[in-house]
Image (tube, rainbow, N blue to C red):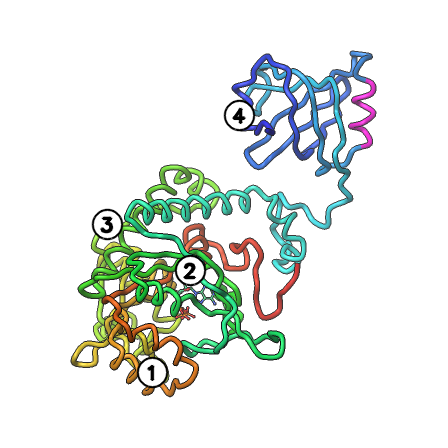
Amino acid sequence: MKINVNELNNYLDQEITFSGFVDAIRDKKWVMFVILRDNTGKVQMTIEKSDENNQKLLDIMTNLTVESTVKVTGKLVSNEAVKLGGIEIIPSTIEVTSMAQPLPFDFNNLDGVLIDTRLDYRWLDLRNEKNMLARQIESTMVQAMREFLYNNNFTEIHTPKLIGTASESGSSVFELKYFDRKAYLAQSPQFYKQMAMAAGMNRIFEVAPCFRAENSNTNRHATEFTSFDLEFSYIDSYEDVMSLEEDLLIAGLTKVKELYGDKIKEVFNKEVIIPTKPFPKMRLKDLYQELHERYNFDIPEHDIGDMNAEAEKLTYKLALEKYNSEFMFIVDYAATKRPFYHMRDENGVLQGYDLIWRGTEITSGSQREHRFDELAKNAKEKGLGKDVEFYLQFFKYGCPPHGGFAIGVDRLTMLLLGLTIKETQFLFRGPNRLEP
Ligand code: ATP
């Protein structure tokens, strides 16, 4: 197994083999310093020019470009004068494992480099320390959330992304040729999560792509994104769903703060704040009133019963000012603005919510309608016919009361680190971007 930079201290005064990128070559009069790098850090390799045996190594390095990769064998020694961790590798052999051509831009200094140029060469862009760190932080957040669910008896499932009908909600679906018929890319695993409830699986989750044919160019929408989706049974109300989401986010953020809190402050200038339960909650009607009174904001006519980007931003401001919280649940959306599978109470009030964090929606959740007759009625009201017939069948043979939510993973990372979605996704997918 390759030894990583952050493990080198275990090998002091030993003969080691180290592989990595050539980060920098500093050719001085008496000595050549080569900085080697992997995704865990940097280490110095020192080649003395006065030693005749080193001529071959010097020749190799003189002809090498930065960002080439090498496999170095040598002795790891301590040297207090070395700024990089007080250690250095004194090489005996250097093997060039790949030679780098001149780079299209300096990934260490991305100021002024267009985001589209960065995305064209995303594998170079990702070499930037900040981007490398963002990937590790996202992985930690998702791992901690997964672990929380495993510890709470959730089962991870994998639902199909190829689907036969263009269903569900207003968001547009991608259509594709499927042999001699049409198929679609799933915009969410919603129907299949609920099928798992009808199957009696009790508690499930999935972390998987969702596809949305939305021709929008915002800093928070992608045409393909990763959704952290879950669904669980035997709930009493959507309050149970909100409570689980609070615990889940607290678990994720606690782990991230523990492992990366200081680094996030240093590199991204963002504080990781662990929220406390319960997160503040507001009814949409009351929110409208507060936003009007405090900020003179009125929701445009066509968005009444729902939120828009501006309202989300101001909701964050309000949450901070009124509750000293970065999070806020919004409830009592208009049923006309929400999917038909969200439950409504006897007064028609929607049993669902959105969660706003740092000015952007990160989640929609609800208690679902599990009663066949009610669900069929709601679907019909929305004008959904044949497309949801297969889904309605799930509720015919007994199905426990249940609820769930979906958190956009890309949005979580983006808001955690103060980035845009293009900078955040491993590879952004948008209306004008399908490559690389
Ligand atoms: P928005 O109103 O922001 O477009 P939405 O209401 O369409 O989002 P949902 O269908 O409720 O979103 O999806 C659940 C979650 O998935 C959202 O809260 C968000 O975190 C994430 N999400 C939805 N659409 C996108 C997208 N196009 N790109 C990235 N993340 C998304």
- The image shows residue 371 at horizontal and vertical percentages of 24, 75
Say what amino acid the circle numbered 3 marks: Thr
Q: Is residue 245 left or right of residue 25?
A: left
Q: Secondary structure at mark 1?
A: helix
Q: Is residue 78 above or below residue 337?
A: above
Q: Secondary structure at mark 2?
A: strand
Disc number at residue 408?
2
Question: Is residue 315 among the parts visible in the rendering?
Answer: no
Of the image marks 4 and 2, the number of the one nearer the N terminus: 4
Amino acid under disc 2: Gly
Vertical relation: 49 (above or below) 393? above
How far, Cα to Cα, is label 4 from label 2?
34 Å
**Quadrant location of ligand 1?**
bottom left
Mark 2 Cα-neighbour bin, 10 Å: few <14, some 14–19, many ≥20: many
Disc 3 C-beta below 8 A from ligand 1: no
Question: Looking at the rendering, which quadrant does residue 54 occupy?
Answer: top right
The residue type indicated by label 1 comes to Ala
In three-dimensional space, the C-alpha distance between marks 2 and 1, rounded to whole angstroms, equals 25 Å
Mark 2 or mark 1, which is nearer to you? Answer: 1
